[in-house]
Amino acid sequence: MLTMLGTGFGSYNMAMAAMSPCPLLHGSAVGEAIIVLSWLLFTGTLSYVKVMVGVILRDRSHSALVWCGAAAQMGSLVGSVTMFPLVNVYRLFKSGDFCNTQCPS
């Protein structure tokens, strides 16, 4: 349940990043608070799940914990291989232009 909740927060964060430089509620305190809370909850829930899986596997055996670490590294590899073309080839994410802060209405 916590994994699905954390994934939901991560999906919201990804959607806001894709809408950059003009995410939902751009320029409002509520929008900024929602994004900060979403990042905190995303990081907190998935970090908790990762630590608890490690604790459970540590109690099982040393090799289970090693395989858990290998799976975490494989997840990092898959994430980086997925994000690299989205950022550098397809230019899905753009930096904000601080000289021109006009968002389309």
Image (cartoon, rainbow, N blue to C red):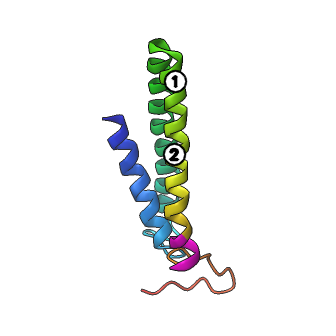
Which quarter of the image is occupied by the N terminus?
A: top left
Horizontal side of residue 88 vs 25, given as left or right: right
Given the image, on which type of amino acid does mark 1 rest? Answer: Leu
Locate residue 97 relative to residue 33 in the image: left or right. right
**Amino acid at the residue labelled 2:** Met
Q: In x, y percent, where is residue 23? A: 47, 71
The answer to whether the residue labelled 1 contacts the one labelled 2, judged by CB atoms less than 8 Å apart, is no
In space, the residues marked 1 and 2 are separated at their CA atoms by 14 Å
| Residue 12 spot, x, y in % from top left | 40, 58
Q: Which residue position holds label 2? A: 74
Would residue 88 be found to the left or right of residue 3 on screen?
right
Question: Front-most of 40 and 76?
Answer: 76
Can you say which quadrant of the picture contains the C terminus?
A: bottom left
Mark 1 surroundings: few (<14), some (14-19) or many (≥20) residues within 10 A: some
Instruction: Give the residue displayed 51% in from the left and 45% down from the top.
Output: 74
Please give the range of residues in magenta.
85-90
Q: Which of 22 and 65 is in front in this view?
A: 65
Q: Which numbered dot is residue 84?
A: none
Magenta region includes residue 22: no
The crowding category of the residue bearing disc 2, from other C-alpha atoms within 10 Å (few below 14, some 14 to 19, many at least 20), is: few
Q: Examine the image and state in which quarter residue 60 appears.
A: top left
Q: Is mark 2 on a helix, strand or loop?
A: helix
Residue found 59% across the figure and 75% down from its top: 88
The residue indicated by pointer 1 is 65
With respect to residue 39, does 50 lie above or below? Answer: above
Q: In which quarter of the image is residue 91?
A: bottom right
Residue under the point 47% across and 12% down = 59
